[in-house]
Amino acid sequence: MGFGGAAPGEHVTRDLVDGFGRVHRDLRISVTDRCNLRCTYCMPAEGMKWLPRADVLTFEEIERIARVMVGRYGFTSIRLTGGEPTVRAHLPVLVERLAALGTDLAVTTNGTSLGLLAHDLAAAGLKRINVSLDSLRRERVIELTRRDCLEQVIDGIDSAIEAGLAPVKVNAVLVRGVNDDEIVDFAAFGRERGVSVRFIEFMPLDASGEWTVDKVVGRQEIVDAISAVFPLDHVALDHGGSEPAEVFRYRDGRGDIGIIASVTNAFCGSCDRVRLTADGQLRSCLFALDEVDLRGLLRSGATDDELGDVIERCVAAKWAGHSVNQVQFIRPRRSMSKIGG
Ligand code: SAM
């Protein structure tokens, strides 16, 4: 694919389409591979090898790639993630630069620094935020994250609400035998605080390789558990946009929940996402085995046309869908925190 009749360097908006006709509009950017927590289903307790600082994209480089995605390919949504995005120094500066591109802009964070940062992020132009929290019990949070941070995260959620970020969503990864007894507690928490809880199925992207399918808590079980206490109505298969959640609304009008059933009800058919790792590698799928090196191109002085050719080739080669739980499935070399969840 090229840019048709456009002169080199000319600003063109065209769809970034893969071999299955999926148009891409959503860019996930990992701003760092580092994290201040060590969630058991994501990272080992010790021994993570961080990227050397020089390998991590600068704000200028991130902005350049984002501009290409928005300006050339009409991307409408950008999400900053990591690692933990708030451990990257001066995150609000990056937010301000990306907010100027005019897309929907969101951050996914573990919430521990929002008490300090929520107002600065909102002032920089951030509109909404997702906060990850996998238990509402202090001792369990300590076991899960290997840090004593529940109070800090709840304070972070409250600070985000106070700062006017909306919606504030809470992401909870459910793991069988670990926190699957808290489904209804999470629903109650969301209803009380006016935040929407997104239940995420556990995926085989844990650094320790301990994922097995019986640890996945499936969509129907979540809906049944909540509905028994707080009746739910199915709203939409919200797979089309930047948010791959299936949404259910409380019948009494007190908000909604979402379920991201990446394993039991994969939404690959409508995937519109590409991912940029902190070291500047572009991936067309969370589970991709290949990636393309945009950092090398940027640093060797590539033009936007040259970047575009490589981006288009990466997306053209995207597969129909991941094959988690099928015999041919191969775990990607990078775990979740090194890709950017
Ligand atoms: N540090 C930020 C946070 O905590 O949200 C952003 C990065 S984190 C990798 C992004 C999301 O991925 C979090 O909601 C986390 O719970 C989720 N995650 C990490 N490992 C996962 C796994 N193996 N399966 C499902 N979700 C996972």
Image (cartoon, rainbow, N blue to C red):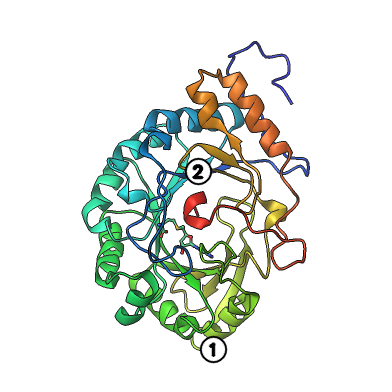
The disc at residue 277 is 2
Q: Residues within 10 Å of mark 2 (few under 14, many from 20)?
A: many
Measuring from the top left, give residue 224's x and y in whole percent. 59, 84
Percent x, y of residue 136: 35, 78
Name the residue at 43% across, 74% down: 254
Label 1 environment density (alpha carbons within 10 Å; few <14, some 14–19, many ≥20) = few
Q: Quadrant of the N terminus?
A: top right
Q: Answer whether residue 229 is visible to the viewer in this image.
A: yes
The kind of secondary structure element at disc 2 is: loop
The residue closer to the viewer here, 132 or 197, is 132
Q: Relative to the observer, which residue lies in front, 222 or 40?
A: 40
Residue pictured at 69% horizontal, 64% vertical: 324
> Disc 1 or 2, which lies upstream in sequence?
1
For image coordinates 47% across by 74% down, the residue present is 253
Q: Are marks 1 and 2 in contact (CB under 8 Å)?
A: no
Instruction: Tell me the residue that label 1 is attached to.
Output: 228
> Which dot, 1 or 2, sits closer to the camera?
2
Q: Is residue 290 left or right of residue 131?
A: right
Residue in the picture at 77% in, 66% down: 327
Residue type of the residue flagged with mark 2? Thr
Q: Position of residue 142 (x, y in %)?
A: 32, 75
Q: Is residue 241 above or below residue 197?
A: above
Tell me, for residue 308, which label it has, or none. none
- The furthest residue to the left: 116
- Residue 88 vertical position relative to residue 228 in the rendered view, above or below: above
Residue at the bottom extreme, as displayed: 228
Per the model, the C-alpha gap separating discs 1 and 2 is 41 Å
Mark 1 C-beta to ligand 1 under 8 Å = no
Question: x and y percent of residue 99 in the render?
Answer: 39, 37
Q: Quadrant of residue 38?
A: bottom left
